[in-house]
């Protein structure tokens, strides 16, 4: 007898995705939101349109690169709470960018602390942090909206951490930050919205 799902019973196919659904739920408790391309990259067995109703799906037009009209794109997002649908596009993009950093750095949920709560930001704290054998790492996501003085201030403010990882959505921004502040942090280019 075949173990393939029967077309008339699509819910049968979902049973094999139950572990991934649980993993997605755990991830969203920490990451807050993910966009459809992130879901496809990090949860390849799941289909956005077939997620259970307990996952809140919504669409939003965002500018992943601040002031980058060319980067404006409409994306589908998933969250655990409907409250995230009410956040600004800038805030949603920041949450998704911060989540992308966790995945790119391969940091487990247990070691990652996300300070970006959605509605407001914790002043004086990085977006996230994680622990390593060498110390605590400060994590900052930047869509390009920070002034040069803000970048310098944040880097100086996070100097007490073991190290700093700074993610930027724009490739040129990443190169610029690396050229100006290369020794202060590890700079990563994070096009989180792309497929």
Image: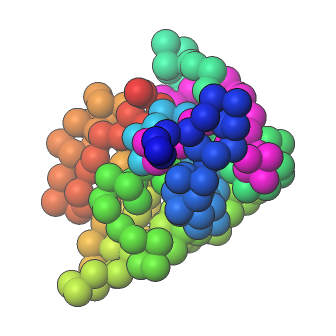
Q: Position of residue 53 (x, y in %)?
A: 79, 46
Residue located at (73% from left, 47% from top): 52
Can residue 72 be seen here? The reply is yes
Which residue is pictured at 42% across the width and 27% down the height? 194
Taking depth in this image into account, of 29 and 18 the one nearest to the observer is 18
Q: Quadrant of the C terminus?
A: top left
Q: Which residues are magenta?
A: 43-65
User: Relative to 68, is 81 above or below?
Assistant: below
Give yes or no for residue 167 being in the magenta stretch.
Answer: no
Report the residue at 23% width, 62% height from top: 184
Task: Say whether residue 50 is left or right of residue 39.
Answer: right
**Residue 25's spot in the image, x, y percent?**
63, 61
Residue lying at the far front of the rendered structure: 1
Q: Is residue 87 left or right of residue 98?
A: right
- Please say which color scheme the image uses: rainbow
| Residue 152 in sight | no
Q: Could you tell me residue 58's position as x and y percent? A: 74, 34
44 in the magenta segment: yes
Nearest the viewer among 127 and 39 is 39
138 up-or-down from 49: above or below: below
Which residue is found at the position 54% from the left and 52% from the top?
17
Q: Is residue 110 above or below residue 145?
A: below
On the picture, is 138 further left or further right than 179?
A: right
Q: Position of residue 54 (x, y in %)?
A: 78, 53
């Amino acid at each position: 007898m075949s173990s393939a799902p029967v077309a008339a019973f699509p819910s049968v196919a979902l049973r094999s995705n139950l572990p991934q659904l649980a993993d997605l739920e755990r991830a969203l408790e920490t990451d807050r939101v993910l966009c459809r391309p992130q879901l496809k990259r990090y949860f390849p067995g799941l289909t956005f349109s077939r997620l259970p109703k307990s996952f809140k799906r919504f669409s939003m037009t965002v500018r992943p690169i601040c002031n980058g009209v060319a980067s404006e794109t409409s994306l589908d997002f998933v969250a655990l709470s409907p409250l995230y649908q009410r956040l600004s596009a800038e805030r949603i993009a920041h949450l998704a960018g911060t989540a992308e950093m966790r995945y790119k750095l391969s940091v487990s949920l247990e070691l990652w602390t996300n300070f970006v709560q959605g509605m407001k930001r914790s002043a004086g704290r990085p977006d996230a942090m994680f622990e390593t054998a060498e110390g605590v790492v400060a994590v900052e996501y930047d869509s390009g909206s920070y002034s040069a003085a803000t970048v310098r201030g944040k880097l100086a403010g996070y100097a007490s951490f073991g190290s700093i990882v700074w993610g930027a959505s724009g490739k040129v921004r990443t190169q610029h930050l690396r050229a100006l502040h290369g020794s202060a942090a590890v700079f990563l280019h994070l096009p989180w919205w792309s497929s």
